[in-house]
Structures are given as structure tokens and as C-alpha cells.
Image (tube, helix red, strand yellow):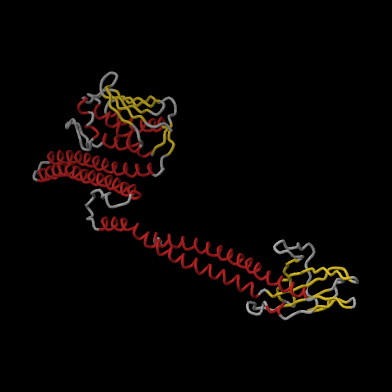
Amino acid sequence: MHKPSSLRWRLLWNLALLLVVLMLASGLSAYWNGREAADTAYDRTLLASARTIAAGLSQRDGTLSADVPYVALDTFAYDSAGRIYYQVNDIHQKLISGYENLPGPPPGTPRTDSYPALARFYNATYKGQNVRVVSLLKAVTEPNMNGMAEIRVAETDEARVSMARSLAADTLLRLGMLAIGALLLVWFAVSAALRPLERLRTAVEERQPDDLRPLPLVEVQHELWPLVRGLNHFTERLRGQFERQAQFIADAAHELRTPLAALKARLELGLRSNDAEVWRSTLESSAQSTDRLTHLANQLLSLARVENGARAIAEGGAQLLDLSQLARELGMAMAPLAHKRGVALALEADEPVWLRGEPTLLNELLSNLVDNALAHTPPGGNVILRVTAPAVLEVEDDGPGIPLEDRDRVFERFYRRNQQVAGSGLGLAIVGEICRAHLAQISLHDGEQAGLKVRVSFIAG
């Protein structure tokens, strides 16, 4: 099974990824800002060189000449890592000095507004190198010559790229140091914030298996209170479940111990006799005791099925069922038993009544209610199984009924109001558990003639 990652490391990893993205974005931004700053700085030097060259233009005998002083190119000597190219063209765009084929400005290149000069800056490629070029127009107004001479000065972009990279690297270095500091601060902050969880984990691990006391709330932050309250609520339900199981096991052991001891004593007494009639009587009474034990065991298994069915309903396993059809099938199955006991079993269910539930549990509920009614109805009496809308089930009998003071106790496990009537005391307890699983309301009422009427109100489907 894959081990889940640490909350602390997951938070730091996500924060680190975010910081890396921010650093990359900041680095790119710093590079382009640095390149723009470098262009601004070096463009000023390019223009100064072009102006120096333009100042050396002179006209002699109708011919324009250029005296390019060394200082025009010397401004790049200390801060340039690249090469410098220049070109001077006369008013007819004829080369009079410098390098040949130096690219001119592309069509539509605007004149710069940053400097008071007829200059245009642009990027080009010369001799396989990326260069930055300034084109400066110089007016020539001589008696025999009138027009615009052009001076071009180009510089390879190594210095500009180096400056931009230096600014980007410096920015990334500072951001990296800031990111490391932020991650360390987050690490210590998260570690401090998780200490209450560590204390809570230690408190849970150090508890004994039978220690189901609530966890204290005083040592955790407010954000952890819902978690601790949820654990305490779960622990409370678990303690209640353990207590019910322990009580059920104790009651079941008590209920089984007495009939088993009686059965064993009866068999031992029969074995001491040599009379066949005594043997037969012993076997018959033992068979009846065995039937009662079998019924008790089946009731105990039914309780286990109720718990499993309730869990299935809670997990969304309920089905859409017709309560009238279930009552009809159960009535047909119980008819022979009612006839054997001399009781008339009637069904009143004219139309379908739909609800959502677990079919096995609902059959168990119907079976226990009808069996309980048949067991308490004298021969010649009547038991009515009635289903009405929206989702109400009623079982009415002609028996002795249940006094008001005992109606709350009959849903307790192993409670039998009349010890003379055979039974395990689990029938109505099972019915109550099934009703709770279906969120149904069960109530006891006096019958219309006599006896008892049990009403179960379900949530209609």
C-alpha cells in the first residue's frame, strides 16, 4: 500500500514549485528589462559616436569626405565586449568611409523621440552577427552640394546580452535566497503548527485499547476542534456499541445457560430410568427445548443481520420496495402457522405502497410482528396485517394486549412480560432495531376490539 506523503513536505513542495515558477517569470522579466536598460544605455553611446563622425564631415571640390577621429569609436573600448562597425554615405548614398554592406534601416523604422536628432535605431544582422545599429542623418548645405548624408554605427550585442544576463542572474540569486529563507520560515511555522497534532497522535497511541474517554480540547487550535470533536463523537458511539455488545453477550449467555442446563438435567434424568415411556417423554420435552433453543439462536442471528443490514442502508444500499407486496408474500407464508393455531390471518393491502429499504430486514420485521401477534392471540381470534398510504404498516390482534406501563420495555432485549408464553424476548427488540435502521417510527396502541395494534410509519419512497 502506498504510504501517504507528509503534509509538511507536500506543503513545502507546492510552495517550492510556486516559487520556482515566480523565479522563472521574474528572471525572464529581469532579462528583458535588463536588455531594455542596456539598449537605452548603449544606444546613447552609439548616437554619440555617430554625432562625432558626423562632425568630421567636410566638402571639398564638390566631394564629401569624412574624417573619422579615433575618439568616435574609443567610447566602446572600456565597456564593450563586441565589435564596432561604421559607415558614412554621402547625399547620394554612396559609401565614402567605413564598412561596406552595413544594413540600412528597414522600411517604416520610426525616428527616435528620445534624442534631439534625426536618428533611427534598429536591430540587424551583419557578417553573421546580431548588431544594434543607429542611422543618423546629417544635413549638408554647401553651395554646390545640398542633401542628407547618413552615418551608420553598429555594435554587436554581446555587451547588451551580458548586461541583461547579469541583471537576470542577480535577480534570480536574490529571489533564490529569498525563496530559501521563505521555505525555512514556512518549515518552522508548519512544524510549530503541527505540534498539537503530534501531541494528539501521541495521546491516542498511548491510550489503552479499552480507554474510550474523550480527547481534551484545550491543547489544540480552534481549527482542530472539529476533528477532535468528531473523534470524540466516534469514540462515544464506539463505547456505546461496546457496552451494548457486552450487555448482549451477557444476556445471551444467561438466556442460553438456563435452557441448556435444564435440557442437560432432563436428559440425565431420563437416562436413569429404564421405562420406555419416561424415555419418550424425555425425548419429547428435549425436542421442545431444542426448538426453543433453535428459535433463540435464530433470533440472535437475526440481530446480527439487522446490524449488517443497517450498515448497508447507511452506505446507500436501500432498494425501492412495495410494502404491500412484501406483506402479501409474508401473509401467504404465515397462513399455515395461523391455521395450525386456529387464528384467522387477514391482509388489508389494496394498492402498492413504495418505500426505500432493505428487503431482508423488512421481511424480518413483518415476520416478527405477525409471529408475535399469533403467539398472543387465543384460538378463534383474529390477526390483521394492514398496509396503508403513504407508508404505514399495522399489525392488530385479539390477544390480551400490553399495559401502558410495559409498552416501553417490550422493545428491550430478552424482556418477556408473560413468562408463560414461549418466546425469546427478542422479537420486538429486533423490530425496534429494524425501525431505527429505516428511520421509521414504531408505536403501540389498543386494538379496535381488544388486544394490541402495532403501527410502523416509514418514510415513503
Q: Nearer the viewer, residue 223 or 377?
A: 223
Q: Nearer the viewer, residue 151 or 128?
A: 151
Give residue 365's quadrant in the image: top left
* Quadrant placement of the N terminus: bottom left
- x, y percent for residue 99: 78, 79
- x, y percent for residue 345: 33, 26
Q: Nearer the viewer, residue 21 or 101?
A: 101
At x 19% / y 42%, what residue is drawn? 251
- How many marks do you count on the picture? 0
Seen in the image, is 403 located left or right of residue 185?
A: left
Seen in the image, is 134 located left or right of residue 18?
A: right
The reply to whether residue 1 is in sight is: no
- x, y percent for residue 362: 36, 36
Farthest residue to the front: give it: 143
Give residue 34's quadrant in the image: bottom right
385 to 1, vertically: above or below: above
At x 83% / y 68%, what residue is drawn? 148
349 to 201, vertically: above or below: above
- x, y percent for residue 220: 30, 52
At x 26% / y 34%, what residue is drawn? 428
